Image: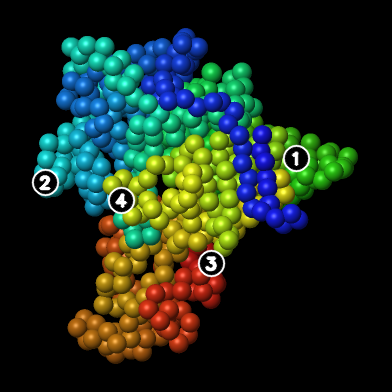
């Protein structure tokens, strides 16, 4: 039950809460969740693995999966890992990732995800900060990078790196043959919901990733309640999801645990999104989890493939879907004519679109960034209910979500069970509940900045408002973290600081909020420009002319490439433009302390930012 309360009579809602549906207890850990799934449905499929021969999906029962988990866990014990030790996983989304996740938890270990796209610099910080003792990597390139790091970094001395492509799983199983399985039982039984399960590193405003400590309770208490909160999705007679989001992302990990908590859920893995359409077609999921960019690309691809008359039909169908969905929110509902138009559009367009998602999808879950009302209404009108939600790494993924029975498109829905959402005086969203993390790893100052008061309440840094009934609407971002359309959190300071190190550069504004990639606006240092030109044997030119000079641009392209070495590909600058003037205190683009007024600059150069993405 969700309750929404104003702070004063006749005032707008300032707080909303949803009560727990499933009581939480201390024994609820990830090993407990897997054991419960085996107890209640041992022979039902839990995992589907795609065969390398023929591309067929072969199912693995819950009992068989747990047996494999315990074999790998025994191997981890054999390698000297003790309860509470940290182990890393660096890989694309794969069966081996999920197997390693649960094996590490079965052995009482703490899992530290590393994005497969992470640079050596990023990996070094994550592995040293969390004091990882063992890492499972996907391929030889990752193995080489992390082995070199271990040799260079004294704090990583003794860290073991094993590679999936070099039969790491088989080796671990063989090494664990002599381990007494009673040791695993003992480790799992000693775990409680308050124990640390994973440290997920997320970008901070300083650019250095912070380790978000999530407990077993954060994950499992939230997931068992989510199963009952959205039974249409997770308690249906058939529940199938194909995981293709990175499992280093907390949203993917949340679904990985939620499927185990689902009575009959089955998960598959798609490591290469280039094959996603084929994999969706053969796996045939019942729901799809993705970031908004995926749904945008499906829409855009459908529009782009259609030409001439077919394109006109598609666009007319899209308008019909949006109108139909909007009409669903009115007391009268869609009229007879609109229903007939929608039925015709379904035969011509929507059925084919649903086929792209595998043909059986009834719900799509969108998170990691704003989907937008247009796409939300389009997909619902096309016969696929969009459940848009909101959350952070610090809330173990969702803290609010729209429900099949209670959806308001354009909002991010109602609080999750066991969760309260409040608006501070300045509109900042505060969250309290079962998913809220316990703090940043060994960073009490950063923890104290965001965890406040009784509960505690998490300061999200986002600005919002409540629609009637307690539906949360995100209206802005208090913090400067950029969230791309693909759901990637990017701290601009790392790139801006590095790029400003080039002699030609005065100011940098990294952009990309809700855009397909990261871009940048760059201004030239007018004092350094003549010196740079002279040292490179180039003729004098004024700053405005320099902005269009191909040699200047080539130099800045090299500078951008060097700056990108500090981040993953998803965080890298893909497009930039050189502005004809600089940011100054006088023109209102710098503060007196010479910090860029980000919101003002984005507003003033909105046309230039739009142009960055039209040329991609």
Foreground residue, 391 or 187? 187
Of the numbered discs in the image, which one, if any, rests on residue 610?
A: 3
Which is more N-terminal, label 1 or label 2? 2
Residue 591, x across and y down, in percent: 43, 79
Asked if one can make out residue 134 in the rendered structure from this viewpoint, the answer is: yes
Point out the frontmost of discs 1 and 4. 4
> In the rendered view, would you say 500 is above or below 69?
below
Q: Which numbered disc, 1 or 4, marks the residue that appears first in the sequence? A: 1
- Residue 538, visible in the rendered structure: no
State the CA–CA distance, disc 2 to disc 3: 46 Å
Q: Give percent across and percent down for residue 496.
A: 35, 67
Of residues 15 and 114, the one drawn nearer to the viewer in this rendering: 15
Q: Is residue 55 above or below residue 536?
A: above
Q: Residue at x 39, y 75 (%)?
A: 595
Residue 119 at what x, y percent from top left?
A: 27, 50
Residue at left offset 58%, top offset 50%: 422
Q: Nearer the viewer, mark 4 or mark 3?
A: 4
224 on left or right of 561: right
> Mark 2 — residue?
154
Residue in the image at 26% along x and 77% along y: 503
The residue mark sitting in front, 2 or 1, is: 2
At horizontal 51% and vertical 74% (from top left) the residue drawn is 600
Q: State the mark number for residue 443.
A: 4
Judge the density around disc 4: few (<14), some (14-19), many (≥20) Cα neighbours within 10 Å. Answer: few
Label 3 – label 1 distance at C-alpha:
32 Å
Pick the front one: 74 or 383? 74
Q: Earlier in the sequence, mark 4 or mark 3?
A: 4
Q: Quadrant of residue 89?
A: top left
Q: Is residue 584 left or right of residue 86?
A: right
Q: Quadrant of the N terminus?
A: top right
Name the residue tied to disc 1.
Answer: 345
């Amino acid at each position: 039950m969700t309750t929404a309360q104003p702070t004063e009579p006749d005032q707008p809602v300032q707080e909303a809460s949803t009560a727990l549906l499933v009581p939480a207890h201390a024994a609820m850990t990830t090993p407990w969740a897997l054991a419960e799934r085996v107890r209640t449905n041992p022979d039902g499929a839990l995992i589907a693995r795609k065969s390398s021969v023929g591309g067929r999906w072969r199912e693995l029962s819950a009992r068989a999966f747990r047996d494999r988990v315990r074999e790998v866990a025994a191997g981890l014990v054999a390698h000297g890992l003790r309860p509470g030790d940290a182990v890393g996983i660096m890989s694309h989304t794969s069966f081996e990732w999920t197997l390693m996740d649960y094996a590490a938890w079965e052995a009482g270990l703490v899992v530290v995800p590393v994005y497969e796209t992470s640079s050596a610099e990023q990996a070094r910080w994550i592995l040293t900060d969390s004091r990882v003792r063992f890492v499972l990597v996907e391929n030889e390139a990752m193995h080489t990078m992390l082995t070199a790091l271990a040799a260079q970094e004294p704090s990583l001395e003794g860290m073991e790196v094993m590679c999936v492509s070099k039969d790491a799983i088989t080796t671990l199983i063989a090494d664990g043959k002599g381990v007494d399985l009673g040791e695993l039982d003992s480790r799992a039984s000693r775990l409680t919901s308050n124990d640390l399960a994973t440290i997920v590193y997320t970008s901070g405003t300083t650019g250095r990733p912070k380790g978000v400590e999530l407990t077993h309770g954060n994950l499992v208490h939230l997931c068992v309640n989510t199963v009952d909160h959205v039974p249409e999705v997770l308690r249906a007679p058939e529940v199938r999801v194909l995981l293709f989001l990175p499992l280093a992302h907390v949203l993917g990990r949340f679904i990985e645990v939620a499927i185990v908590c689902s009575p009959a859920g089955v998960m598959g893995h798609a490591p290469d999104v280039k094959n996603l359409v084929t994999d969706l077609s053969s796996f045939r999921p019942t729901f799809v989890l993705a970031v908004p960019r995926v749904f945008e690309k499906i829409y855009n691809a459908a529009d782009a493939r259609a030409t001439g008359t077919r394109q006109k039909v598609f666009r007319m169908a899209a308008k019909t879907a949006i109108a139909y969905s909007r009409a669903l929110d009115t007391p009268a509902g869609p009229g007879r004519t609109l229903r007939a138009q929608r039925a015709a559009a379904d035969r011509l367009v929507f059925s084919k679109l649903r086929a792209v998602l595998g043909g059986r999808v009834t719900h799509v879950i969108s998170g990691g960034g704003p989907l937008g009302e247009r796409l939300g209404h389009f997909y619902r009108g096309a016969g696929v209910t969009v459940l848009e939600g909101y959350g952070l790494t610090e809330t173990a993924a969702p803290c609010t979500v729209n429900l099949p029975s209670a959806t308001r498109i354009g909002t991010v829905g109602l609080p999750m069970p066991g969760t309260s959402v409040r608006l501070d005086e300045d509109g900042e969203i505060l969250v309290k509940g079962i998913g809220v993390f316990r703090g940043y790893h060994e960073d009490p100052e950063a923890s104290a900045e965001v965890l406040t008061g009784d509960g505690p309440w998490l300061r999200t840094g986002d600005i919002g408002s409540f629609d009637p009934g307690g539906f949360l609407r995100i209206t802005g971002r208090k913090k400067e973290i950029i969230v791309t359309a693909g759901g990637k959190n990017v701290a601009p300071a790392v790139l801006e600081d590095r790029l400003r190190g080039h002699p030609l550069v005065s100011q940098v504004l990294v952009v990309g909020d809700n855009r397909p990639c990261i871009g940048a606006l760059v201004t030239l240092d007018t004092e350094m420009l003549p010196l740079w030109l002279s040292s490179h044997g180039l003729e004098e030119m004024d700053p405005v002319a320099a902005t269009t000079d191909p040699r200047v641009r080539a130099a800045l392209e090299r500078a951008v490439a060097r700056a990108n070495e500090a981040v993953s590909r998803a965080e890298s600058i893909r497009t930039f433009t050189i502005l004809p003037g600089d940011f100054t205190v006088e023109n209102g683009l710098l503060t007196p302390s010479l910090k860029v007024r980000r919101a003002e600059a984005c507003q003033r150069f909105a046309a230039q930012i739009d142009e960055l993405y039209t040329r991609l």
